[in-house]
Image: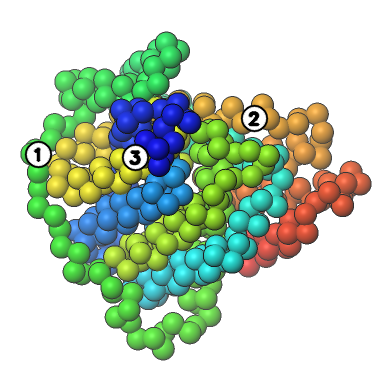
């Protein structure tokens, strides 16, 4: 096992990888409850969606770990599930079964362009400056999520956002967790984020901020209401302009969210060499396969999670981290009552997201800020992600600006032809979608 995953080569061990896998799992376990809630608004059975979510995450993450050997976990994507419910089913009036078929179809297209190397070619054509900008932007984005979830940052009518009440239970617990985690990290504990999360959870339960679990195990909800529902549809509804727009949107958002996430996490783990991602085709195939499998089980688009960075920060360096995370998603089917501490108390996981944001934002140092033609698209990419609450929007803005600034500087020949093509694709995205 250690030879297959290359433990010695990456300076890691079974224990370190297992702790990293657990850290990643705890950082993204909220999806087990948020996803069923969102998709139930579209008329889907919440119990079945819970089971589908756990299985899709486990299968996708296992493929990523065993085949691509990356410490990256997958699960139904936030944002994509909201689009599924409020944009497609409720907004466009499309049945959720048809919407699931749209997700399945987008996954199949993913697989095709991955096998034919088109997807990998596109990612390798993206300049390193924009990749680093995407990584840094994701760091700010997930830190903002942590601050928002813990109510350290709250909405404000006059200024849009402002500082929350730090002396109230949740924010105070999060601030405590940040200090504890920072101390662990400064002292050099490789599992510092994990240990900080555990201590924060214990303090949260003892103080009553976090709920006590009602039990240890629970029955696994039936998958029957959603399993293969994507193929129970009237296929005359498939060949419509509306569904075409749905498929393209799923495809577009997942494509660039995944590209940014894969590069950010792989860069943090030290895998990126010469602006290229080793085994990118296998990593992308794992992601695209998970999308189609998840749709068959009964959930929206499954994609790579930026929360995987918390596992990398805890010492995860190989695919065994993902194997550990996948195993925990399966275990979660039986012990879901215990997850209530983490999923119902954002303050417990917020410190991990904030500290991970700090680590990923270190990519800022690799951008050449002295060259204005590089600085502008990079800065807009970074800034747009947290301000629009969208990784895809940030990437799109940067990709539109980059060819423009390079042409203005007289460096247009240095821009890959694919980047010019993406310029028009992203323009169309903002204009028509």
Residue tagged 3: 1
Is there any visible trace of residue 385 in the rendered image?
no
Q: Nearer the viewer, residue 59 or 320?
A: 320
- Badge 2 or badge 1: first in the primary sequence: 1
- The way the protein has been coloured in the rendering is rainbow
Instruction: Please tell me whether mark 1 or mark 3 is closer to you in this view.
Output: 3
Is there any visible trace of residue 40 in the rendered image?
yes
Q: Say which element carries label 1.
A: loop
Q: Position of residue 158 (x, y in %)?
A: 53, 34
Q: Position of residue 404 (x, y in %)?
A: 81, 51
Residue tagged 2: 364
Q: Quadrant of the N terminus?
A: top left
Q: Does 416 sit left or right of 348 as displayed?
A: right
Q: Say which element carries label 3.
A: loop
- Badge 3 or badge 2: first in the primary sequence: 3
- Compared with residue 254, is residue 378 higher up or lower down, i.e. above or below? above
Q: Say which element carries label 2.
A: helix
């Amino acid at each position: 096992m250690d030879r297959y995953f290359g433990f010695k080569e990456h300076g890691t061990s079974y224990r370190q990888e297992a702790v990293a896998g657990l850290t990643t799992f705890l950082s993204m376990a909220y999806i087990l409850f948020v996803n069923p809630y969102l998709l139930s608004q579209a008329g889907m059975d919440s119990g079945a969606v819970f089971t589908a979510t756990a299985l899709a995450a486990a299968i996708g993450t296992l493929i990523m770990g065993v085949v691509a050997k990356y410490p990256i976990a997958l699960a139904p994507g936030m944002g994509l599930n909201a689009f599924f419910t409020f944009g497609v089913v409720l907004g466009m009036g499309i049945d959720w079964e048809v919407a699931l078929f749209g997700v399945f179809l987008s996954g199949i297209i993913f697989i095709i362009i991955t096998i034919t190397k088109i997807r990998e070619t596109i990612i390798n054509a993206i300049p390193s400056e924009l990749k680093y900008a995407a990584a840094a932007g994701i760091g700010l984005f997930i830190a903002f999520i942590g601050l928002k979830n813990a109510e350290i940052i709250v909405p404000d009518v006059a200024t849009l956002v402002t500082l929350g009440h730090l002396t109230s239970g949740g924010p105070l617990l999060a601030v405590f967790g940040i200090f504890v985690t920072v101390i662990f990290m400064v002292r050099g504990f490789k599992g510092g984020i994990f240990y900080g999360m555990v201590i924060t959870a214990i303090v949260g339960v003892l103080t009553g901020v976090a709920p006590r679990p009602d039990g240890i195990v629970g029955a696994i909800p039936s998958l029957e209401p959603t399993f293969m529902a994507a193929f129970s549809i009237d296929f005359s509804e498939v060949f419509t302009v509306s569904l075409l727009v749905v498929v393209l949107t799923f495809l577009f958002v997942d494509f660039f969210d995944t590209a940014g996430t894969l590069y950010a996490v792989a860069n943090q783990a030290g895998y990126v060499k010469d602006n290229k991602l080793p085994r990118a085709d296998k990593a992308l195939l794992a992601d695209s396969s998970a999308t189609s499998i998840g749709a068959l089980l009964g959930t929206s688009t499954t994609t790579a999670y930026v929360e995987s960075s918390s596992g990398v920060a805890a010492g995860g360096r190989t695919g065994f981290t993902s194997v550990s995370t996948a195993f925990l998603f399966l275990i979660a089917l039986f012990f879901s009552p215990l997850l209530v501490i983490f999923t119902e108390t954002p303050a417990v996981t917020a410190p991990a997201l904030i500290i991970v944001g700090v680590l990923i934002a270190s990519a800022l140092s690799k951008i050449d800020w002295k060259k204005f033609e590089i600085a502008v698209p990079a800065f807009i990419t970074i800034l747009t992600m947290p301000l629009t609450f969208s990784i895809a929007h940030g990437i799109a803005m940067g990709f539109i600006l980059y060819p423009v600034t390079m042409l203005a500087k007289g460096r247009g020949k240095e821009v890959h032809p694919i980047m010019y093509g993406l310029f028009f694709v992203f323009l169309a995205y903002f204009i028509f979608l």
